[in-house]
Amino acid sequence: MVTGHCILSHGFESGPDAAKVTALAEAAQRVGWTAERPDYTDLDARSDVSPYGDVYARIERLLALARAAAERGPVVLAGSSLGAYISGAVSMQVRPAGLFLMAPPIHMGPAPALQAADVPLSLLHGWNDELIPAGDVIAWAQPRRARLLLVDDGHRLSHHVDASAAAFRRLLQSLYNA
């Protein structure tokens, strides 16, 4: 039984076949959710727009996918790093059933601070993240009462792919059982 659809957004200079979003897709499918992994690599190559690629074009692409998916049923947005940032931004316009953010950039240059709809929210972040201080993520998560898993890892969370998938599966299961 399919209970909803997940849109899994990769980070900057990554891709839809990256280990974390692949593991999330597999976790979603194991608990009856469908999943898609948009490809933003063409936008990331446009580094003349910003040091993070074309962030606003990424948001527009995800927004179109999320709106279409929401017409068919529950949607969960998930992303890593820049993918987390755009997932949070899109959640403000298309209210998902849940939101899963890995290594989320709380502040990103001149762009607005990270936002997130008031929905079930889980975060995974590395204590040793060299780009985004863990303290910033803790401070952002606290007023939102988000589920937060801090792990002994850096920004890429490469030693915690399985932990990412397990945390995502728990979020999806909590939505199904709610």
Image (spheres, grey):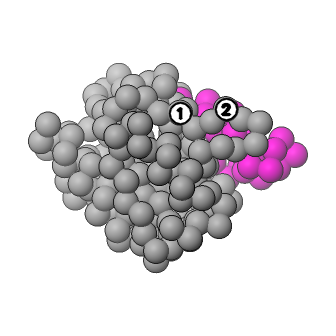
Q: Nearer the viewer, residue 24 or 177?
A: 177
Q: Quadrant of residue 95?
A: top left
Q: Nearer the viewer, residue 69 or 131?
A: 131
Residue at label 1? 115
Crowd around label 1: few <14 · some 14–19 · many ≥20 (10 Å): some
- Badge 1 vs badge 2, beta-carbon distance below 8 Å: yes
Left or right for 166, reference 136: left
Q: Secondary structure at mark 2?
A: loop
Task: Report how far apart the C-alphas of labels 1 and 2 lie in the structure.
Answer: 8 Å
Residue at label 2? 112
Does residue 95 sit above or below 134 in this rendering?
A: above
Count of residue discs:
2
**Magenta segment boundaries in residue numbering:** 35-63
Q: Residue at x 60, y 58 (%)?
A: 133
Crowd around label 2: few <14 · some 14–19 · many ≥20 (10 Å): few
Q: Position of residue 20 (x, y in %)?
A: 46, 64
| Image quarter (top left, top right, bottom left or bottom right) of the N terminus | top left
Q: Is residue 47 magenta?
A: yes
Q: Residue at x 35, y 22 (%)?
A: 71
Q: Secondary structure at mark 1?
A: loop
| Image quarter (top left, top right, bottom left or bottom right) of the C terminus | top left
Three-letter amino acid code at the position of disc 2: Pro
Does residue 163 sit above or below 97 in this rendering?
A: below
Does residue 30 sit above or below 75 in this rendering?
A: below
Q: Position of residue 173 (x, y in %)?
A: 19, 49
Three-letter amino acid code at the position of disc 1: Gln
Residue 70 appears in the figure:
yes
Q: Quadrant of residue 114?
A: top right
Q: Position of residue 66 (x, y in %)?
A: 45, 31
Does residue 104 sit above or below 110 in this rendering?
A: below
Q: Residue at x 37, y 29 (%)?
A: 118
